[in-house]
């Protein structure tokens, strides 16, 4: 999961600091060696713009919203939310063009995914133009190594904007719009820094586009070389399509493959817990671990909850829970011990 706010904050500050050392190549190595310590202990002593200060406030808000709020009790949640909103407001007072703060503030304010989707769709072109202008300004006169990093950092707010646009479109049932937004982002960032291919996989499954999903699988090596086509999003999308055409044997085989890819994590497929979406970006979790499967299942609610049954689950969700319990009895026991139910 590539969008790490703290790492990006470090990169922004390191770039800014490096630019001040160009006139002193002799002392540059020594100065950069102490940069990390100064950033951690005395950030205000380093050169920075209001945009840099605003982004730092965004990183603080992201930590509160994405990594502390989900585990807070009601009283703590109220305090964390108020603090995060204050940080985002301060960020916008420093830099009204801080697109991450604009986007995250809207998430905090608007409960409706439909309203968020419309606002994101209306602003997407302007945000891209703003980021491109900033990229061109910063990159002017930089060497190749710095230019590549500066260009990447400058475009990330638009990437996150588009990734959320695709996700909100999927939540709203605008599946073709989700595909369009995903493909637009992949065209601009073929390495898929935002992992928008996961959203694309679910949108294609919602559209019952087996050809499109197969094409996405074929593109995986160029999009994300470190990952194979056995992540939970691809496999759950394939399970959904097999279940939709009532090929339960194929669906069961795919589910078994999913359990092999995420050993010891089958309880997540039975419990099917919903998590709040990340405000800064998709939550960062280790690949092929139980947290990643929980995240994929949560985002897969759009598939799992279709066609609500008497059990309270969707047709696919109920089948996945039953089949997982049969394939992995230990997962069923874990889910029961944790308070989950295996609905039959």
Image (cartoon, rainbow, N blue to C red):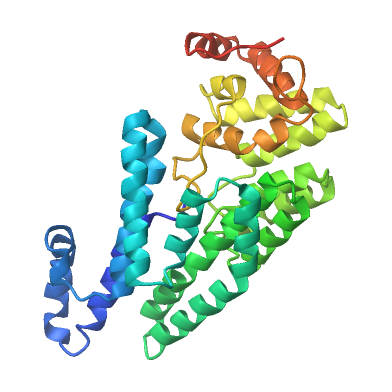
Nearer to me, 170 or 92 = 92
Place of residue 338 in the rendered image (x, y in percent of width and height, measured from the top left): 47, 13
Q: Is residue 342 left or right of residue 2?
A: right
Report which quarter residue 67 is drawn in: top left
> From the viewer's perspective, is residue 261 above or below residue 55?
above
Toward the right, the furthest residue is: 245
Q: Is residue 188 left or right of residue 69?
A: right
Nearer to me, 214 or 310 = 310
Q: Is residue 199 left or right of residue 23?
A: right
Place of residue 313 in the rendered image (x, y in percent of width and height, measured from the top left): 70, 21
> From the viewer's perspective, is residue 318 above or below residue 150?
above
* Residue 72 seen by the camera: no
Place of residue 315 in the rendered image (x, y in percent of width and height, measured from the top left): 77, 24
Report which quarter residue 159 is drawn in: bottom right
Residue at 13%, 74% in the rendered image: 31
Place of residue 305 in the rendered image (x, y in percent of width and height, measured from the top left): 71, 29
């Amino acid at each position: 999961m590539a969008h790490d706010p703290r790492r990006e904050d470090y990169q922004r500050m390191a770039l800014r600091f490096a630019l001040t050392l160009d006139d002193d190549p002799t002392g540059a190595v020594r100065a950069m060696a102490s940069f990390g310590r100064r950033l951690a202990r005395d950030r205000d002593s380093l050169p920075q713009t209001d945009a840099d200060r605003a982004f730092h406030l965004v990183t603080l808000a992201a930590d509160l919203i994405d990594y502390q709020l989900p585990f807070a009790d009601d009283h703590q949640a109220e305090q964390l939310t108020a603090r995060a909103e204050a940080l985002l407001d301060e960020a916008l007072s420093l830099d009204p063009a801080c697109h991450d703060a604009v986007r995250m503030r809207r998430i905090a304010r608007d409960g409706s995914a439909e309203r968020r989707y419309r606002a994101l769709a209306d602003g997407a072109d302007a945000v891209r133009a703003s980021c491109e202008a900033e990229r061109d300004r910063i990159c002017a006169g930089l060497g190749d190594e710095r230019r590549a990093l500066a260009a990447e950092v400058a475009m990330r707010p638009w990437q996150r904007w588009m990734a959320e646009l695709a996700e909100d479109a999927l939540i709203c049932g605008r599946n073709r719009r989700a595909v369009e937004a995903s493909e637009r982002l992949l065209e601009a960032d073929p390495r898929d820094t935002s992992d928008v291919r996961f959203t694309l996989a679910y949108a294609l499954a919602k559209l019952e586009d087996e050809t499109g999903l197969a094409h996405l699988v074929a593109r995986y090596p160029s999009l994300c070389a470190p990952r194979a086509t056995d992540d939970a999003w691809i496999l759950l999308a394939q399970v959904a399509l097999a279940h939709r055409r009532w090929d339960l044997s194929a669906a069961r085989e795919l589910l078994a493959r999913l359990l092999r890819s995420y050993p010891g994590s089958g309880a997540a497929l039975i419990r099917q817990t919903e998590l709040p979406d990340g405000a800064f970006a998709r939550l960062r979790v280790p690949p092929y671990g139980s947290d990643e499967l929980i995240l994929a299942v949560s985002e897969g609610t759009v598939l799992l909850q279709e066609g609500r049954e008497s059990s309270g689950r969707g047709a696919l969700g109920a089948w996945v829970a039953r089949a997982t319990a049969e394939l992995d009895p230990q997962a069923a026991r874990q889910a029961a011990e944790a308070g989950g139910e295996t609905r039959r």
